[in-house]
Image: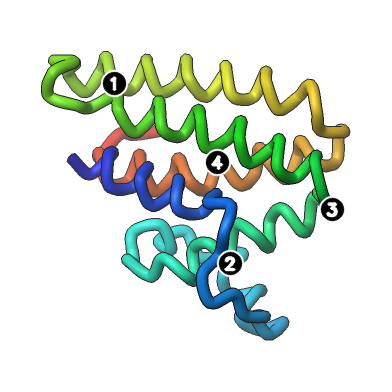
Amino acid sequence: MNLKRTLLIAIGCFSIQVMFAQELTAEQKERLEYKIDIFTSGEKEIQELWYEDQMDKMKLKGELRENYKKIVVYHAYKMERLDDLDKKLNDKEVYKALQKQLKLMNTDVKEILNTEQYVIHDDTWKAILRAVYYQKKWDN
């Protein structure tokens, strides 16, 4: 259930419309950049702004930004569904399926991002996965 909640929050980070969009101060952005537990805090607006900031760092605009969001939302949703009861996967199987879905996502986004953008994408997802691994008590 923690994986589902964390990934649901991550999906919220990628939503196309950011409700009550607001500009973060430089200090808030710096704190968020190094804060890993933002995905478990329940502060959806801050999480969305954090991911929007990551996309700003990638300098994604217009159609490229929308296409990137679509890819990430699609794969994040697939990841979220991995621990559904009807799938009957144990933790080890969920972990392996999560890794497989992550590779698929990375392959898809690599086709549209340049090298610098991909590095930011990769670092962002490493932070998301650290939160998932922490909640699931996985050692990675």
User: What type is the residue that disc 2 sits on?
Assistant: Leu
Dot 3 corresponds to which residue? 59
Between 40 and 17, the residue placed more toward the observer is: 17
Few, some or many C-alpha atoms within 10 Å of disc 2 (few <14, some 14-19, many ≥20)? many
Residue type at mark 4 is: Lys
Quarter location, residue 78 = top left
Q: Of label 2 and label 4, which has the lower sequence position?
A: 2
Compared to residue 112, the image places residue 104 above or below, namely above
Within the image, what quadrant is residue 25 found in? bottom right
Of marks 2 and 1, which one's residue comes earlier in the chain? 2
The kind of residue tagged 1 is: Val
| Marks 2/4: CA–CA distance | 18 Å
Sequence-first disc among 3 and 2: 2
- Residue with the mark numbered 1: 94
Q: Residue 32 at x, y = what percent?
A: 57, 69
Could you tell me how far apart the alpha carbons at marks 2 and 1 are, in whole angstroms? Answer: 28 Å
- Residue 51 appears at what percent x and percent y? 60, 57
Give residue 26's quadrant in the image: bottom right
* Element under disc 3: loop
**Residue position marked by numbered label 2 in the rendering:** 49
